[in-house]
Image: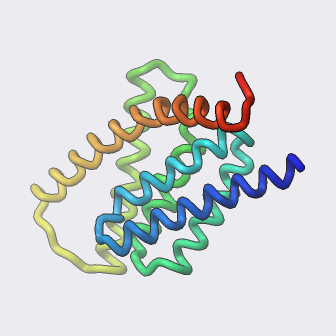
């Protein structure tokens, strides 16, 4: 029975993540917002069943997104950044506050710059000015900091909700 619940819960979170990515792609606002929301769906899986199941859900959603969604940039954002970030986020826990922030922003910027270079060079050759690119990167960093700030609060709310729903207390 426990294994069935585990599989059902992980499947529902994978389905919710996939639907969020599809809706984000259809509405045209999915390049960053939909992968962020889909990444948040991995947090309850990690809380309940650990990083092994969280990784499996992330890989399943990544595969489904490349099959079902034609927005490659959005799919890459989920695969390389916002889907795996909830899994690797605990690795930053051993550092002080400022070192943690610098490391997280460095990881974010490396991934974003690599993905955008790939998209611009291979998929959609666009030309934007360096000022606009810097402004977009700055806004992305601010958004990522807010996203990282929101994650522990979301985890707390989800744990309270799930413990009340299942009757388990921590």
Q: Residue at x 54, y 44 (%)?
A: 86
Residue 105: quarter of image: top left
Q: Nearer the viewer, residue 74 or 30?
A: 30
Which residue is outermost to the right? 1
User: Eyeballing the image, is 13 above or below 63?
Assistant: above
Q: Residue at x 35, y 43 (%)?
A: 144
User: Eyeballing the image, is 16 above or below 69?
Assistant: above
User: Eyeballing the image, is 22 above or below 97?
Assistant: below
Q: Quadrant of the C terminus?
A: top right
Q: Nearer the viewer, residue 95 or 21?
A: 21
Q: Residue at x 35, y 48 (%)?
A: 109
Q: Nearer the viewer, residue 60 or 91?
A: 60
Residue 56 screen position, x and y as percent:
70, 57
Residue 14 screen position, x and y as percent:
62, 60
Residue 22 screen position, x and y as percent:
45, 71
Display colour scheme? rainbow
Asked if residue 32 lies left or right of residue 61, the reply is left
Figure disc tally: 0
Q: Residue at x 56, y 80 (%)?
A: 67
Residue 60 screen position, x and y as percent:
65, 65
User: Eyeballing the image, is 98 above or below 137?
Assistant: above
Which residue is outermost to the top? 96
Asked if residue 55 lies left or right of residue 80, the reply is right
């Amino acid at each position: 029975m426990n294994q069935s619940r585990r599989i059902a819960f992980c499947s529902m979170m994978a389905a919710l993540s996939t639907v969020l990515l599809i809706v984000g792609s259809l509405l045209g606002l999915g390049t960053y917002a939909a992968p962020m929301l889909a990444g948040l769906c991995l947090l309850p899986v990690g809380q309940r069943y650990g990083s092994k199941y969280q990784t499996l859900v992330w890989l399943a959603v990544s595969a489904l997104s490349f099959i079902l969604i034609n927005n490659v940039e959005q799919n890459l954002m989920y695969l390389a950044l916002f889907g795996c970030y909830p899994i690797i986020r605990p690795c930053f826990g051993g550092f002080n506050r400022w070192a943690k922030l610098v490391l997280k922003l460095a990881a974010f910027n490396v991934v974003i710059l690599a993905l955008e270079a790939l998209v611009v060079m291979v998929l959609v050759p666009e030309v934007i000015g360096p000022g606009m690119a810097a402004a977009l990167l700055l806004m992305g960093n601010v958004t990522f900091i807010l996203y990282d700030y929101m994650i522990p609060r979301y985890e707390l709310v989800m744990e309270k909700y799930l413990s009340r729903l299942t009757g388990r207390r921590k």
